[in-house]
Image (tube, rainbow, N blue to C red):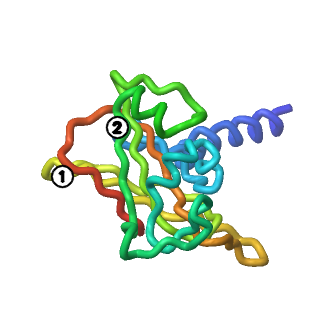
Amino acid sequence: MKKFATTFLSGILCLALFLPMGCKKYPYNAVMYGNATKNKAWLNDEFYEENLTGKSWSFVQEIYVSNDEYPETRTVKIADREAFNKTFKEFPEEVDFEMSMILMHGFTTASGSSYEIRDVFIEDRVLTIKYMYIPVKRSPPNASMPMTKWVIVVMDRVDTETVEFRYGK
């Protein structure tokens, strides 16, 4: 019985020490919805087509759009219910726009990878969200047609002049 109790307590201690490391909290209660393929299903079709990024596939025009007509990336801030309703047909959580906002970053990729936040900070009134793809070990390589994919961050409402998404560590 003594051996069981020691093993049980060691397991609880291990969980208490190491579990929080996998549950990192980011400033401003930032949470990323980083499965860019799943996120597209939440978007209104009109929003998606109006906010394409260069070299991505247009389902309406049935062509790859050029970089000359469309930007490489887009950043969208949603701070009220009206903008939310124009952007989304569904969303996994209720957002209180008195306290929170949604930030979105669109870019062209053929990857089906998911993404996660690396850091969130404000410096000189610029809110920066650093993010990176989540490495997955699988075969064959994951790829799809180049599409505008969106990472979405729900976070506390903050007053900043600029929002910047940075890909990388």
Does any portion of residue 56 appear in the rendered image? yes
Mark 1 neighbour density, 10 Å: few (under 14) some (14–19) many (20 or more):
few
Q: What percent of the width, then of the height, locates residue 164?
A: 30, 56
Q: Distance between the residues labelled 2 and 1?
A: 14 Å
Q: Which residue is drawn at 40% across and 75% down?
A: 67
Q: Mark 2 points at which residue?
A: 28
Q: How many labels does the image show?
A: 2
Q: What element carries label 1?
A: strand
Q: Is mark 2 on a helix, strand or loop?
A: helix
Give the quadrant of residue 119: bottom left
In this rendered view, identify the residue nearer to me: 126 or 24. 126
Vertical relation: 127 (above or below) 148: above
Q: Name the residue under label 1.
A: 123
Left or right: where 113 falls relative to 11: left
The residue type indicated by label 1 comes to Glu
The residue type indicated by label 2 comes to Tyr
Vertical relation: 59 (above or below) 22: below
Give the quadrant of residue 158: top left
Q: Which of marks 1 and 2 precedes in the sequence?
A: 2
In this rendered view, identify the residue nearer to me: 18 or 135. 135
Q: What percent of the width, then of the height, locates residue 12?
A: 67, 37
Q: What percent of the width, then of the height, locates residue 71?
A: 37, 67
Q: Looking at the figure, which quarter contains the C terminus?
A: bottom left
Vertical relation: 59 (above or below) 141: above
Q: What percent of the width, then of the height, locates residue 35?
A: 60, 53
